[in-house]
């Protein structure tokens, strides 16, 4: 049986660290991006996401630890890995005095693996895929931010890729553009390409990702498949009753921390602590009158803030 | 930039033509007095005028922009992940700067020959050694001057390339290259530091007058080539060690 041996992880790192002087921008992270996943890489500004991406792509040196990209060690195997990786790193960058098409020609001819005979066809296909066929002949300095962003994605799609690394891919895009990019990512993912998206637009990530990692102050504070992370989340419980004292007593007997405010009782259920249904049963059996009972799963934003802290000072 | 370079011989010949007055030997730049007698001297004179400042300035702009220019627009990171090997990128950039040196010198000389032949009589040229050589022989000497000056600019290109790997601000690298070239010429004019003169990048820059002697003396061409080659090797190695270990954070 002939089968191309695919590495289990498109990206994997162990103790990957980057120090700038005494500052640890990336602090011993173990990142595991399964092949074929749409991986959301979250974190506040300055948490080390882009530095991690720069190390993975060989733009920045690794201070300590190890990383592999498509199974090849970084940096020694980058020559073999990079032709299979399309990337958008910290915003698109182009030669402003060249047209969109000429820019793609220039970057494609820089890649020695790229076949010059199919270049024109591949460039036009990439431009069509991001809807820039009309504007391909315009000089890039006349492009809007959104058009540059789409041209950057087109640049990542010049070759058949195994991995796309997209750093803030919808930055500067209008709602239509954001939707288009989301659809594009879905269709690329359905072709089996592993997609690694760094973003802080949580709604975006929530809609398309199968896996997540959250970075904060250089460390990974949560990582896993979206289902696993959801299963391990805490639930917020709110019940309205006239017998708050009785309700509080009952909850604390069950080992649940709860507070009352007027006739509203709120409590936090830790993962796998007790099913909310059981609490209702307990209350009813104890003849505590319940007017309303709500269970709220935290939004991704709540969890993000919970993991990374609140306020502007979260990342130094 | 090449168009600006071509303005030097043009402005020079028009000035001589319009003034009408005979330029006395020793007035103005070398060979200027001969321009009105023989248009071929426009190329020589323009080269003498442009070598100390104008040509180094244009080379500094091109060489200083090589890496820093790509870094400042951010295109450097996309080239490197294309992927382009860093050493190969340096070589390509140096070859680009060298190609510009050739283009600059050719532009200057060809414009000089063309405008000189239009505005002034053209004939056999009297060399510095007093001999007279034919027009085709003169053109060969002009070609030799072109080779000589191009080689002179290669060391500066390597220096500019190295300075360009140190910064993401292209203007900084350009200015630094101009400053180094100027300081070397100032040092070269101070007899007190004569001991370091032979090691200065600019030491042989104006030595191309040797090409205008008979019998043809190529010793300064060889010494210049050796000196420039040393600069290329030293700054090439520095660029390599700096650039291949650099974090691209722009």
Image (cartoon, rainbow, N blue to C red):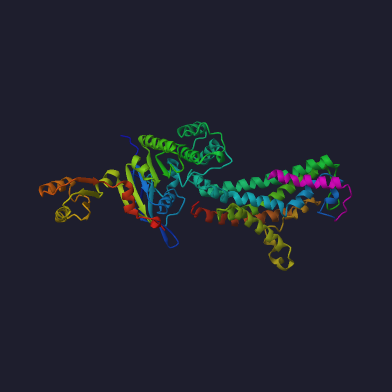
- Placement of the N terminus of chain B among the 4 image quadrants: top right
The residue nearer to you, when weighing A235 against B167, is A235
User: Would residue B23 appear left or right of B221 to someone viewing this image?
Assistant: right
> Residue A56, position in %: x, y?
42, 49
Q: Is residue B19 magenta?
A: yes
> Residue A182, position in %: x, y?
39, 37
Secondary structure mostly taken by the magenta-highlighted segment of the chain: helix
Place residue A25 in its image quadrant. Answer: bottom left
> Residue A230, position in %: x, y?
27, 46
User: Would residue B19 appear left or right of B234 to someone viewing this image?
Assistant: right
User: Would residue B180 appear left or right of A174 to someone viewing this image?
Assistant: right
- Tell me which residue sits at (78%, 53%) in the image: B209
Visible residue check, residue A216? yes
Q: Is residue A218 magenta?
A: no
The residue nearer to you, when weighing A28 against B116, is A28
Place residue B223 in its image quadrant. Answer: bottom right
User: Would residue A298 appear left or right of B187 to someone viewing this image?
Assistant: left
Q: Residue furthest right?
A: B21
Compared with B116, A130 (above or below) is above
> Residue A84, position in %: x, y?
42, 40
Q: Residue furthest bottom?
A: B192
Visible residue check, residue A31? no
Which span is picked out in magenta?
B1-26
- Tell me which residue sits at (52%, 45%) in the image: B75
Query: How many numbered callouts?
Result: 0
């Amino acid at each position: 049986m002939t089968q191309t041996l695919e590495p289990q992880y498109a990206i994997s790192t162990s103790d990957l660290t980057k120090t700038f002087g005494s500052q640890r921008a990336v602090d011993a992270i173990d990142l595991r991006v399964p092949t074929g996943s749409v991986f959301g890489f979250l974190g506040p500004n300055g948490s080390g996401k882009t530095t991690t991406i720069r190390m993975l792509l060989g733009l920045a040196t690794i201070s300590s630890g190890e990383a592999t990209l498509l199974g090849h060690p970084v940096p020694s195997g980058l020559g073999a890995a990079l032709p299979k990786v399309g990337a958008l790193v910290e915003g698109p960058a182009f030669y402003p005095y060249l047209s969109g098409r000429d820019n793609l020609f220039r970057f494609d001819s820089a890649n020695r693996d790229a076949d010059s005979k199919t270049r024109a066809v591949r460039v036009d296909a990439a431009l069509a895929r991001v809807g820039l066929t009309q504007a391909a002949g315009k000089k890039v300095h006349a492009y809007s931010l959104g058009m540059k962003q789409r041209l950057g994605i087109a640049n990542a799609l010049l070759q058949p890729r195994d991995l796309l690394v997209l750093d803030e891919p919808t930055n500067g895009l209008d709602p239509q553009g954001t939707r288009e990019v989301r659809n594009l990512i879905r269709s690329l993912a359905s072709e089996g390409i592993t997609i690694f998206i760094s973003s802080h637009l949580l709604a975006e990530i929530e809609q398309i990702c199968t896996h997540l990692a959250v970075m904060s102050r250089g460390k990974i504070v949560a990582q896993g498949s979206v289902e696993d992370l959801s299963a391990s989340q805490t639930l917020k419980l709110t019940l309205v009753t006239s017998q708050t004292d009785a309700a509080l007593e009952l909850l604390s007997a069950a080992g649940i921390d709860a507070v009352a405010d007027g006739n509203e009782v709120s409590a936090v259920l830790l993962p796998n602590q007790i099913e909310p249904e059981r609490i209702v049963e307990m209350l009813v059996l104890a003849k505590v009158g319940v007017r309303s009972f709500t269970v709220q799963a935290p939004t991704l934003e709540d969890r993000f803030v919970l993991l990374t802290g609140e306020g502007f000072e979260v990342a130094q | 930039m090449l168009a600006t370079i071509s303005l030097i011989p043009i402005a020079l010949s028009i000035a001589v033509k319009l003034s009408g007055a005979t330029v006395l030997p020793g007035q103005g730049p070398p060979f200027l007095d001969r321009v009105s007698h023989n248009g071929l001297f426009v190329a020589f004179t323009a080269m003498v005028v442009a070598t100390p400042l104008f040509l180094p300035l244009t080379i500094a702009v091109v060489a200083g922009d090589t890496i820093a220019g790509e870094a400042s627009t951010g295109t450097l990171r996309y080239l490197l992940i294309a992927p382009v090997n860093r050493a190969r990128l340096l070589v390509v950039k140096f070859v680009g700067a060298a190609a510009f040196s050739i283009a600059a010198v050719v532009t200057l000389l060809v414009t000089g020959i063309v405008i000189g032949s239009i505005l002034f009589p053209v004939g056999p040229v009297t060399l510095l050694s007093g001999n007279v050589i034919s027009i085709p022989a003169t053109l060969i000497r002009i070609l030799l001057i072109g080779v000589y000056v191009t080689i002179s600019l290669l060391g500066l290109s390597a220096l500019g390339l190295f300075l360009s790997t140190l910064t993401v601000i292209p203007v900084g690298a350009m200015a630094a290259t101009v400053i180094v070239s100027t300081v070397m010429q100032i040092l070269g004019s101070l007899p007190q530091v004569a001991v370091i003169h032979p090691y200065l990048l600019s030491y042989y820059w104006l030595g191309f007058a040797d090409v205008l002697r008979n019998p043809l003396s190529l010793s300064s061409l060889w010494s210049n080539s050796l000196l420039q080659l040393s600069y290329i090797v030293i700054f090439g190695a520095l660029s390599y060690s700096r650039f291949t270990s650099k974090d691209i954070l722009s």
